[in-house]
Image (cartoon, grey):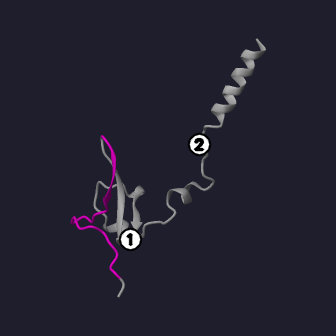
């Protein structure tokens, strides 16, 4: 009987160690590099702006589109369909 309780206690401790830790500052964890309000203002509809991020290698903004089968990283587009990018500095 003691073995049974010991096994249950060990299993509970192992399972408790598998829980996810929540970040201390949730807002900071969600948006470490906030998208400028000007970009959010020109972004077209039906895009998940909560996942938008700036890609320094190409100077454009991207977001994650959650489809039925997979989640894909796609360019953030303005209402007119153009991709939203920063102008290269001269």
Give above or below for 7 relative to 43. above
> Would you call the spot at circle 1 few (<14 residues within 10 Å), some (14-19), or many (20 or more)?
few
Q: Position of residue 80 (x, y in %)?
A: 21, 66
Q: Is residue 57 left or right of residue 82?
A: right
Residue assigned mark 1: 57
| Earlier-in-chain disc, 2 versus 1 | 2
Q: Position of residue 36 (x, y in %)?
A: 42, 70
Q: Are marks 2 and 1 in contact (CB under 8 Å)?
A: no
Which of these two is toward me, 55 or 42?
55
Q: Quadrant of residue 59?
A: bottom left
Numbered range of the magenta stretch: 69-88
Main SS category, magenta section: loop
Give above or below for 43 relative to 59. above
Q: Quadrant of the N terminus?
A: top right
Q: Quadrant of residue 37?
A: bottom left
Extreme-left residue of the structure: 80
Circle 2 or circle 1, nearest the eye = 1
Q: Quadrant of the C terminus?
A: bottom left
SS assignment at label 1: loop
Q: Is residue 86 magenta?
A: yes
Residue at figure coordinates x 60%, y 47% from the top left: 22
Residue at figure coordinates x 34%, y 75% from the top left: 86
Q: Is residue 49 left or right of residue 79?
A: right
Q: CA distance from mark 2 to mark 1?
A: 32 Å
SS assignment at label 2: loop
Q: Position of residue 25 (x, y in %)?
A: 60, 56
Q: Position of residue 26 (x, y in %)?
A: 57, 54
Q: Is residue 15 left or right of residue 41?
A: right
Residue assigned mark 2: 20
């Amino acid at each position: 009987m003691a073995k049974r309780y010991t096994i249950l206690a060990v299993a509970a401790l192992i399972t408790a160690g598998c829980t996810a830790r929540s970040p201390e500052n949730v807002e900071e964890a969600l948006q470490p590099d906030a998208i400028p309000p000007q970009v959010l203002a020109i972004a077209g509809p039906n895009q998940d702006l909560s996942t938008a991020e700036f890609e320094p290698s190409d100077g454009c903004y991207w977001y994650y589109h959650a489809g039925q089968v997979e989640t894909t990283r796609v360019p953030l587009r303005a209402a007119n369909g153009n991709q939203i990018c920063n102008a290269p500095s001269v």
